[in-house]
Image: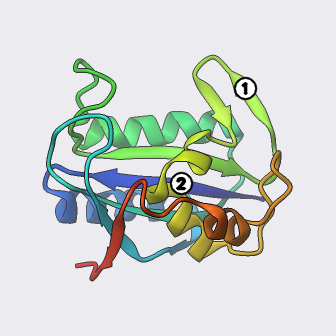
Amino acid sequence: MATIYISIGSNINPSENIQHALTDLEKAFSEISCSRHYESESVGFEGDNFINLVARANTDMDLVVVAERLHKIEDQHGRDRSGPKFSSRTLDLDLLLYDDQIFEQGKLKIPRDEILFNAFVLRPLAELAPDLLHPTENKTYAELWHAYDKDSQPLWPIESS
């Protein structure tokens, strides 16, 4: 059984889309737990604010199969891949970690680079797994969040619905 961490985000009808995503994740994986929900401004483009969180789950699926399953869940919830990379999304599910594996194949890279660069990924991950070591940085997520420039990407916790 592998432990995985998934970044979940939406800025198009986020309450509904995130709830549907969590329902689908509970069907695909076991022992789901989630960070708080966070709101942040869009990064890389002008758009509505995003709601983000990180989920931890267990799976017996292979890493590539997990990534494919997440991609399928995005598609089932209307994810449009025809626009620019940085754009509004009904649902964005990114596999951040798969145990302590280091993996790169095509566009799939684990651990995801976004962990170190985006507050909306690092803060909820640090909340959910503060003592877990980043596989290449050899620092805990709590240490990485403590050192992060929090003024660079403001975000704030919100009540999940």
Which amino acid type is marked by label 2? Answer: Ile
Q: Image check: 58 left or right of 138?
A: left
| Residue occupying the point 24% across, 41% down | 89
Q: Image check: 52 left or right of 114?
A: left
- Which numbered circle lies on residue 156? none
Q: CA distance from mark 2 to mark 1?
A: 17 Å
Q: Is residue 65 above or below residue 151?
A: above
Quick one: quadrant of the C terminus? Answer: bottom left
Viewer-proximal residue among 83 and 98: 83
Q: Is residue 34 above or below residue 144?
A: below
Quick one: quadrant of the N terminus? Answer: bottom right
| Residue occupying the point 28% across, 78% down | 160
Residue 127 position in % (x across, y down):
57, 76
Decide which of tag 2 and tag 1 comes sooner along the chain. Answer: 2
What kind of colouring is applied to the model shown? Answer: rainbow
Q: Could you tell me if residue 28 is visible in this image?
A: no
From the image, tell me which residue sits under label 1. 104
| Quadrant in the picture for residue 82 | top left
Q: Secondary structure at mark 1?
A: strand
Residue 111 position in % (x across, y down):
69, 43
**Pointer 2 and pointer 1: residues touching (CB < 8 Å)?**
no
Q: Secondary structure at mark 2?
A: strand
From the image, tell me which residue sits under label 2. 6
Q: Could you tell me if residue 141 is visible in this image?
A: yes
- Residue at the extreme right: 138
| Quadrant in the picture for residue 65 | top right
Residue 49 position in % (x across, y down):
20, 55
